[in-house]
Structure formats: C-alpha cells, structure tokens
C-alpha cells in the first residue's frame, strides 16, 4: 500500500467515524397534550433516509440521566441500536418539565405524576414525530422501560379516549419490565396496536405474573400481543451493571428490590424488540446491528508507526498513560485507544469502541485521533 493510498484510506475511515461520533442528538421542545406543560425531548434522526421509522423512548421512574450529553450515539446503547437500524429515536423527558427528578422512592398511590400524565406526553410526541420530514407517520413506535413501560401499556389502551381518538397512533409498542398490576385488573383493556411485553422471571419490583396474566388474556381475545419472560433475570435485565439490591423503593412492601443486568436477557431482549418492530412496521432491520463482537464502522489500516506492544511509542504519553495502554492490550476485541498530540488517552470496547474512544479522549484534550484498534497501530504522525 502506497503512502497516498494509506492516507486516503485513513481519511475515509476518519470521516466515517466523525460522521457517526457527531451524529446529532438535539434538544427539541413541544407542548404536551396536558395543558400548561412544555416538554423537552432529545431527538436523534435517522441518517440518510426518507420516511424512516421512529420511536418515542420513555425513561423509567428515575428519569433521564442528569448528564444529557450521554444521550448520544457513542454512549447510549439504544440510540446506537436504533440509529444503526435506520430508525429515529426521540427520548422524552416527562419529569423535568414537571419539576421532578425521580419518583422511584414514592409509593405508586402517592405519585402525582402518573402514567396517565405521561400518556398525554406520548400522544404529543407521536404527533411531533409525524411532522418530521424524514419520518414515516405510518411507522412509529413507543418503547419504554419500567415506569416508561407502564406508560407504554397506558398508551396502548384503546379503551381510553385519549388513545382511541389520537390523531397519530403507533404501529407497534414495546414495554420492558413494566408493572402490570393495574392494567391486569382492567377488564376493558384492549390494544390500539401490536404490543410486546418483556419481564424478568425473578423481578421483585415489577413482578412478571401480572404481565403474563394480562398478555394471556389479550392473546385469548385474539389481540396482537407477545409476551417474553427471561429466566434468572431481575428488574433492569437489559442493563450492563451487576445485580444489586436497591433500597428506598416505593413500589414494594419491603422498600427493597433487586435490579441489574443479565447478559443473555440483555442480548435477547434487544433482538426481540427489533424483530417485533420490524415485523409490525414491515420495515427490514439488519440484526447485525446488535453484534457487539465487531466494529460498527470500518477499521483504519495499520500505519506501521510502531509495534502494538511498544507503549513507549505513544506520543508524549505519561507513565500513567502508558500503564493504561498496557492494560488495554490485555482486553478482548473489539477495542480502541485514542490519543491527542499532547498525551491525553482514552480506551473503549465493543461495537462503537472507535467512536467512544475519540469522544472520551476529547473530554481531556482536542483534537484526538485513534492510536490503535484491535491488534494494530493506526496512528500516523501529524
């Protein structure tokens, strides 16, 4: 490979990485269907698509992360999944505009902010999405987690006038580990669109049994519903964090609940979600976007700058930085290291390792570039 070819290949990969790393997630505002409430949301549009599907994403009882900057391609798993699948995603903040940060500690009977309030937000969000030029109003979805999943169930209920008479309706809905008690008791409950509900077998915060009962009843009535229960899984089974016992939980008799990820359920639930949405949108989705064993974008070619194991070759790197690099050398693929010309360093792993390494490095210094990816050095001297 000639030097010119190497530079062109490196530039091509850099531009691809920059486009994804800079994928715009912008804050938008619009009125809720609840009078007096102006909502904020975080919109990542589908890239390069005309009339693509889009989803409203609903946070749990803890609200959106305080650092809204984490709602971007490099750091948010579901933004990556939907963006790579060609789907827009609108993360809706129902709590901030109402002066709330978390309702997890409140007993459900004492909450002033309920699924009924948030259902009004969903109706407004669907109308906002339908107005976007890159979005197909016929291919909208609603996806929610925990209390957001309960809001999905409320938004799916055709027996409510706000749902039955909504000017824009979803084509499919997905609820991750919702509390189903109240809905299971509503004998008039019926679906406005196909619904997927996923529960953890061992969930002692939002138990699986009422969800199984509700979905069984809907299925017996020939409504379009799918229920999946993940064995050995607790609340928040799609998280990457270990299972822990949480205190100060308002929705349980003991005030405690187990929560944390199950790797098998984490992978399987994302696949279920995409397959379900793809089926009911009649929109093809490449499930390879879920493969964390490969890079999401092309890897730059080896530069020949230095041997991979030679930590001393890193530009202007401190001893601490060199030690971090040597630790990185022991980690599995996919992996990446980014550095700046002044000695900042950041490591990252998984499908978006290259994008994430650059973004994290630029928190300390800018500009940053990739130094090594997987088993090769890709850095070229400025």
Image (tube, rainbow, N blue to C red):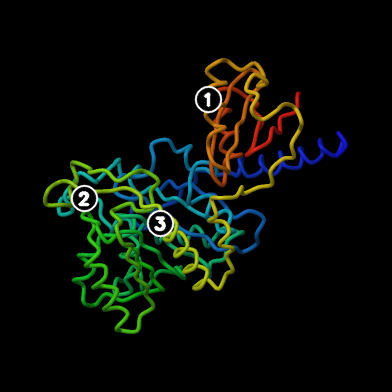
Q: Who is closer to the viewer here, 15 or 328?
A: 328
* Residue 6 % position (x, y): 82, 37
Who's the residue at 66% across and 39% down the image? 18
Secondary structure at badge 1 equals helix
- The residue mark sitting in front, 2 or 3, is 3
Q: Which residue is mark 3?
A: 264
Q: Which mark is residue 324?
A: 1
Secondary structure at badge 2 equals loop
Q: Which residue is mark 2?
A: 112
| Mark found first going from the N terminus, 3 or 1 | 3
Who's the residue at 36% across and 73% down the image? 164
Question: Mark 3, residues whose alpha carbon is within 10 Å: few (<14), some, or many (≥20)?
Answer: some
Q: Who is closer to the viewer here, 220 or 46?
A: 220
- Which of the 4 image quadrants contains residue 33? bottom left
Q: Is residue 305 left or right of residue 365?
A: right
* Residue 259 % position (x, y): 28, 48
């Amino acid at each position: 490979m000639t030097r010119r070819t190497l530079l062109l290949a490196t530039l091509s990969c850099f531009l691809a990485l920059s486009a994804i790393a800079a994928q715009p997630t912008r804050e938008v505002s619009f009125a809720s269907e609840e009078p007096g409430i102006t909502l904020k949301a975080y919109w990542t549009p589908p890239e390069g698509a005309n009339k693509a599907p889009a989803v409203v994403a609903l946070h749990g009882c803890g609200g959106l992360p305080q650092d809204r900057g984490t709602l971007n391609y490099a750091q948010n798993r579901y933004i990556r999944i939907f963006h790579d699948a060609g789907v827009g995603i609108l993360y809706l903040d129902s709590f901030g505009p109402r002066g709330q940060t978390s309702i997890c500690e409140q007993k459900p009977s004492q909450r002033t902010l309920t699924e009924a309030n948030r259902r009004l937000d969903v109706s407004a969000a669907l109308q906002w999405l339908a107005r976007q030029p890159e979005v197909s109003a016929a291919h909208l979805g609603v996806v929610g987690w925990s209390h957001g999943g309960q809001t999905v169930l409320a938004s799916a209920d055709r027996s409510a006038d706000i749902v039955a008479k909504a000017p824009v309706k979803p084509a499919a809905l997905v609820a991750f580990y919702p509390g189903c008690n109240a809905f299971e008791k509503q004998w008039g409950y019926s679906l406005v669109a196909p619904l997927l509900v996923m529960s953890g077998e061992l969930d002692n915060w939002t138990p699986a049994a009422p969800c199984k009962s509700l979905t069984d009843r809907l299925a017996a009535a020939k409504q379009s519903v799918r229920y999946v229960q993940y064995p050995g899984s607790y609340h928040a089974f799609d998280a990457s964090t270990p299972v822990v016992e949480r205190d100060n939980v308002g929705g349980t008799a003991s005030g405690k609940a187990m929560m944390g990820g199950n790797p098998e359920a984490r992978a399987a639930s994302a696949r279920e979600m995409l397959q379900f949405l793809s089926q009911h949108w009649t929109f093809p989705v490449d499930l390879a976007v879920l493969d964390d064993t490969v890079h999401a974008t092309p890897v730059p070619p080896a530069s020949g700058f230095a041997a991979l194991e030679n930590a001393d070759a890193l530009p202007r790197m401190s001893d601490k930085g060199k030690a971090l690099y040597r630790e990185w050398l022991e980690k599995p693929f996919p992996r990446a290291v980014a550095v700046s010309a002044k000695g900042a360093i950041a490591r990252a792993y998984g499908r978006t390792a290259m994008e994430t390494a650059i973004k994290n490095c630029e928190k300390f210094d800018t500009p940053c570039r990739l130094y090594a990816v997987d088993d090769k050095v890709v850095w070229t001297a400025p």
